Structure formats: structure tokens, C-alpha cells
Image (tube, rainbow, N blue to C red):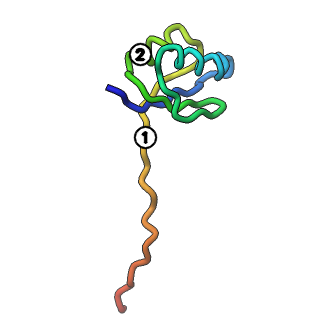
Amino acid sequence: MSERLVVHSVAADAEPNADIARRLRDGGVEIVDQQPHMLLVSGDRQTIGRALENVRGWKVSELTKVPPPRTRERVLKRP
């Protein structure tokens, strides 16, 4: 089952982003979005884990969605 996960750098001496992206692509993982120290990936958790075995300074975590704030104005009651 394919799920979206975040792969992010947690150390200053972590392996370069390009190397991590290449390892994930070679393992059959789709990279949805890429930033300097963070990747949003789609794929099987085990496949992602195998691609990142023995990688220095990178961690896999769940994708967290935050709903947008309610911006609709409310009518105030009379005092």
C-alpha cells in the first residue's frame, strides 16, 4: 500500500539531499516534493526503509496535515 511520508535531515553532517533522492528513486519510491533538507515521498514504508538503510542523518516520519484556520466571520450577540 502506498502512503505519503516525510523524509527529513536531522543532523548537520547528514548525507546530501541529492544522494538520498537518488537512492529513493532507485528503490522505486516516488518523490512528490523536494526541499533542501526535506522530501515528501509516496511509496511503501518498507521500500522506503530499505532505501534508507545505513543512511547517516535522515529520518522518516508521518505526514501531518493541519487544517486551515476558520476565517468566516461570526455574528456577535447583542450585549
| Viewer-side residue, 55 vs 18 | 18
**Element assignment for label 1:** loop
Question: Mark 2 = which residue?
Answer: 47
How many dots with numbers?
2
- Residue occupying image coordinates x 42% and y 54%: 67
Determine which quarter of the picture holds residue 34: top right
- In which quadrant is the C terminus drawn? bottom left
Q: Position of residue 12 (x, y in %)?
A: 68, 22
Q: Which mark is residue 64?
A: 1
**Disc 1 residue type (three-letter):** Thr
Upstream in sequence: badge 2 or badge 1: 2
Q: Position of residue 37 (x, y in %)?
A: 63, 29
Query: Is 56 left, or right, of 4 in this rendering?
Result: right
| Gap between marks 2 and 1 measured at Cα | 20 Å
Q: Position of residue 3 (x, y in %)?
A: 37, 30
- Residue occupying image coordinates x 65% and y 16%: 15
- In which quadrant is the N terminus drawn? top left
Q: Residues within 10 Å of mark 2 (few under 14, many from 20)?
A: some
